[in-house]
Every structure is written in structure tokens, then in C-alpha cells.
Image (cartoon, rainbow, N blue to C red):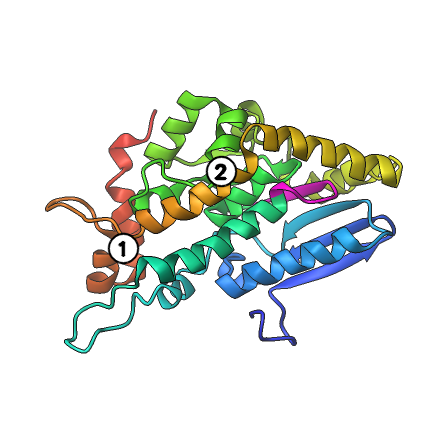
Amino acid sequence: MSLNDPDHPAVLVERNDAIGRLVLNRPNKSNALTFDDAQYLKSCLHQLEEDDDIKVIILKGLGKSFCAGHDFDDVVRSYGLDKKDKNGRPHKMSVRERLTIDRRLAEEYLAFQYSQKPVIAQVQGSAVGFGMYLTELVDMVICANDARFSHAEQRLGFAGNTWHLNMQILTYGPKKVREMLLLGSEFNGQDALRMGLANASVPLEDLEATTETWAERVARNPKDALVTGKAIHNMAIDSLGGTQQFYRGAVGHTLGTLLHFEPGEFNFFRERRDRGTKAAYQNRDASFEDADPT
């Protein structure tokens, strides 16, 4: 399921009166998206922004999870981590090549931050990495009580180097952000509500109905008022460095994926090479177990 597979698109676009829906359609991968899929998601968002009949957009995922991040197999291919040079050593992509990829990622995040119409995320199951970023960037979040949020991607060696620190600091406060990014700990929907990430946390069986009700209430506003209100909101965010954060994030991500690991430090990519992806994830999380607060 990818941008190049029209029979099984990674994102479905639905319209019902004034409500548009972006539906992540990789349930067998917990809606983890390839880089091409994420570009396609951005283009689908623009489709609904430009549809004059649509007032509000719901972002949701099919299956058990909202979005488990980027498809790691695709990440490995995209950054050339599975390649060897002519001497049989691991291929090392240039900074120039990495920045090209990471600027595209920044533009995807920026598109959701600065959408022309309100976007509501409907979150069940896991929201990690790319999925977590989307929840932090859209206008509102309705989640299931047992949803699982985390910045576990920070455990790959980023330790606070991320894409949109401005919005995270505004949402959680600086001390909480440092905790979230340094520990990568998981929290549930009710915690998300308490921390300011979610607008409502409800039982899973009520999630879709609650999200639809909120979207219908938003759609009662006049079209011009909605886009004007969102434009003013975006200008306010931009006055706080909203655009700059994404381009700083692209450079930071490029630097973060070129880390030098000292002896004894956990290197996820070396673990993956030697032990496989599943074992690497297990060992990564085990190395942080003592850091999880009680």
C-alpha cells in the first residue's frame, strides 16, 4: 500500500456533507506510513482544504491503531541503511541527501500545522513517531481512554532533538517536554487529556460517535469564519516561531541520524543489523525500563 498503488491507497479520502475524512489505510502495519505515503497524505489534506464544500477534516486510522509512525523498513531503504559501499562497508548517505529527505518530512508536518481548515484527530491504539507528531500539530484530538501515546522514537538516539519543539513546549510546558523526550515513556488517553494533548478522552466504543459530534459542531460555523479563524490562529503560531521550528527540525533530524555512538551506548541501527528489527526494538525499550517513572 503506497503512493504508487492506486488499487490499495495508503490514505482514503471521504466526504460527507461538510465533513471530510483522511483515513490511514495500512491497518496490517498499524498505519505506519512509508515516506511516499506521508507525501500522499499531505496531498490528500490539500484536496480537502481546496474542496469548498468541506468545513472540517477528521484524521483517523483503520484498524486497531491510529498511526505507529513511519514504516521502518522504508526508513531503512530511504536512508540507504541496507546498502554497502564498494568495500563492503555500510553505506553512509551524505548530509546533502539526508537534508533533501528531511526537508520533505518538515513540509508534511508544516502542512498539518498550517492547514486552512480545522483538523480533528480520532485516536485509538498507538500514536507513536509520525502518528504522535500529527496529534500534536492538528487542531483538536479526541482519543480513546486506552490509546497509547509516546515519543518512543526518541529512544533511537535523538534525546530531545525533534521537529516541533515550539508546539510541544506550548502544549506541555518545557519541563514536561524534556521528560517526554528524554524518557520516551508511554501514556494513555486520560493522561493525554490531563496534559493538554487531547480535548476529550472517551471509552473506545464511543470514540467515533464523539469525534463525529465534535466535527458536526465545528461545521455549524460559517465557512468564511472557519478559514479566517484558522488563518489568524496560524499567524499567531507563526509569530511564536511556528514555521521556523520545522526547518530547524529538518537540520536537527539530519544531524540526529548521523550520530557517533560511544562504546557501551545503545545503537539501535547496529542492533538491527546484528539481531533484526524486532529484537532491536525490544532491546531499545529494555534499555529504558529503569527510566520509566512509577
Mark 2 vs mark 1: give the one in front: 2
Give the residue at x 58% y 39%: 137
Was residue 52 drawn as part of the magenta stretch in this picture?
no
Number of numbered labels in the structure image: 2
Q: Nearer the viewer, residue 53 or 124?
A: 53
Query: Sequence-wise, which precedes: disc 2 or disc 1?
Result: 2
Give the residue at x 37% y 27%: 179
Specify few, some or many for label 1: CA neighbours under 10 Å numbering under 14, 14-19, or 20 or more: many
Q: Is residue 203 above or below residue 179?
A: below
> How far across and down, in percent of the image, does residue 187 sit?
46, 33
> How far across and down, in percent of the image, does residue 241 sit?
53, 32
Give the residue at x 54% y 27%: 171
Specify few, some or many for label 2: CA neighbours under 10 Å numbering under 14, 14-19, or 20 or more: some
> How far across and down, in percent of the image, does residue 167 sit?
53, 32
Q: Which residue is mark 1?
A: 280
The answer to whether residue 92 shows anywhere in this view is yes
Say which amino acid is labelled 1.
Ala
Q: Is residue 240 above or below residue 204?
A: above
Which stretch is magenta?
113-124
- Quarter of the rendering occupied by the N terminus: bottom right
| C-alpha span from label 2 to label 1 | 30 Å
Secondary structure state at the residue bearing disc 2: helix
Q: Nearer the viewer, residue 168 or 123?
A: 168
Q: Is residue 267 above or below residue 203?
A: below
Say which amino acid is labelled 2.
Gln
- Quarter of the rendering occupied by the C terminus: top left
The answer to whether residue 65 shows anywhere in this view is no
Secondary structure state at the residue bearing disc 1: helix
Q: Which residue is mark 2?
A: 245
